[in-house]
Image: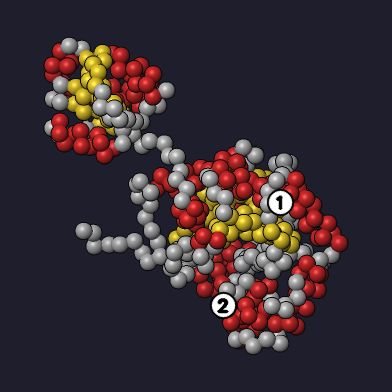
Amino acid sequence: MSTFKAPKGTYDLIPPDSAKYLAVREAIAAPLRNSGYGYIETPGFENIELFARGVGESTDIVTKEMYAFETKGGDRLALRPEGTASVLRAALEANLHKAGNLPVKLWYSGSYYRYERPQKGRYRHFSQVGAEAIGAEDPALDAELIILADQAYRSLGLSDFRILLNSLGDKECRPVYRTALQDFLRGLDLDEDTLRRADINPLRVLDDKRESVQKQLGDAPLLRDYLCDACKAYHEEVRELITAAGVAFEDDPKLVRGLDYYTRTTFEFVHDGLGSQSAVGGGGRYDGLSEMIGGPALPSVGWALGVDRTVLALEAEGVELELPATTSVFAVPLGEEARRVLFTKVTELRKNGIATDFSYGGKGLKGAMKNANRSGARYTIVAGERDLAEGVVQLKDMESGEQTAVGVNEIVAELEARLG
C-alpha cells in the first residue's frame, strides 16, 4: 500500500467512474462547440492580483479560500479559484477583442482550487466546464448561455434542476440600492467581519449561508425595486428570450453571486437532490471586469458548470449514462507465433477505430479469458498454433457464447461488419 494519499478535500478520478466525468464534460461542451465557442486553456496559477481585483478583495474566495504562494523569484501567485478572470486575462493578452469579431466566444474545461471545509459536493480541488462571451452587451447572449446550459443538462438526462434568475443592476442604479442595503444591514445584529463586508460590498452579505444571518434578512430591500429603466428593459428581454425558447426558470430577487464582478443578469442552476450544496452551476454578466484588470470596456457574460456536482446530480436522479464500451474486442494468443500475428491484427483493428485490447504477460487460456470477461469486450479472438496452421482464428461472441472460425485475413472486415 502506498505511503501517500490524495490531499484532504481532493479526489482521484479512476476507471470506471472517470468515464462518467469525461461524458459529462463532453455533454456540456457539445452545445458550446455547436454555437461558435472556441476552446481556451489557461495556466493553473495566475498573478494573485488578477483575482484580488477581478473576483474581489472582500470575497471569501480571496480572503479565505485562495491558495496563494510566493515563488523563489518573488512573484506572488495563486492557484486559480475560478475561470472567468483567467480567460478574460488571456483574451486581452492575445488581443482577441481586436480581431473585429465581437463577441469573442470561448469555452474551457479544467481544475480549480479553493481552501474550503471538505464535504460531499464541495472539494478543495474541483472540475468545471465554463463559457464566456466577451465584448458585447446583448440580452440575446445572456439568454443563449442559459439556454445552452439547459440543453447540456437535459442531454445528460437531468430533469430535476431549476434555473434561478435575477438582475443585479448596473453602475447607474446599483449604488442607490447599495446605500439602502447598507443602511438596513447596519441595523442588524451582525459580527464585526460581516459589518466590514457590508461596508465593502453589501451584496455579499445577502449571500451569507449562516442561518443566524439569513434569519435577519427577511425584510432586506430587494434590488429589483431599485433597477433603472434600462436594466429593467434589459432583464425583461432576457426573460422573454428564455421563455420563447421553452426554458423554464424562476425569478429569485434575492439571488446574488459570490463574486464582485457580476452586473445585470445573474443566474444559478440548482438541484434539490444534492442537499446543502445544491448549486450545480451559475454565472451572469460582468460588464466591468475588463476595466478592473486593466483592459478596455468589454461587456461580457459567462457561466461555469461543476462537473463533480453534475455527476452527483445524475446519481441523485438515478440517471445511468450510456457510455461507449472501453473495449469491444479482446485478443488472446496461445503461443509465440499467435502472439505476433494477433498483435498485428490488434494494431490493424485499432487503426480502423475498433477499441481492442490484448492479453499481455503470456497468460494461459483460462487466465486470459478471465481478463477478456473483465474487459467487457463483446468479442474475443483466440488463436493457437493449430488455428494458424489452418489460416484461421476463433471468434467468440461473449454474450451468446457462440464461437466461429474466421480467416486470419478476414477477421478485421468481419468485426467491422459485426460491430457496425
Tag 1: amino acid: Asp
User: Which residue is depicted at the point 62% across and 37% down?
Assistant: 34
Quadrant that contains the C terminus: top left
Outermost top residue: 390
Q: Which mark is residue 142?
A: 1
Outermost front residue: 400
The secondary structure type at the circle numbered 1 is helix
Select label 1 or label 2 by which is in front.
2
Q: Position of residue 369 (x, y in %)?
A: 20, 33
Q: Position of residue 249 (x, y in %)?
A: 68, 55
Q: CA distance from mark 1 to mark 2?
A: 30 Å
- Density class for disc 2 (Cα within 10 Å; few <14, some 14-19, many ≥20) is few
User: Which residue is depicted at the point 21% across and 58% down?
Assistant: 1
Query: Which quadrant would residue 190 be assigned to in this image?
Result: bottom right
Total labels: the figure holds 2
Q: Nearer the viewer, residue 57 or 32?
A: 32
Q: Nearer the viewer, residue 86 or 218?
A: 218
Check the image and report above or below for 289 versus 358: below
Q: Nearer the viewer, residue 101 or 295?
A: 101
Pick whichever of labels 1 and 2 is earlier in the sequence. 1
Q: Position of residue 65 (x, y in %)?
A: 51, 70
Read off the residue under disc 2.
210
Tag 2: amino acid: Arg
The secondary structure type at the circle numbered 2 is loop
Check the image and report above or below for 372 versus 268: above
Residue 116 in sight: yes
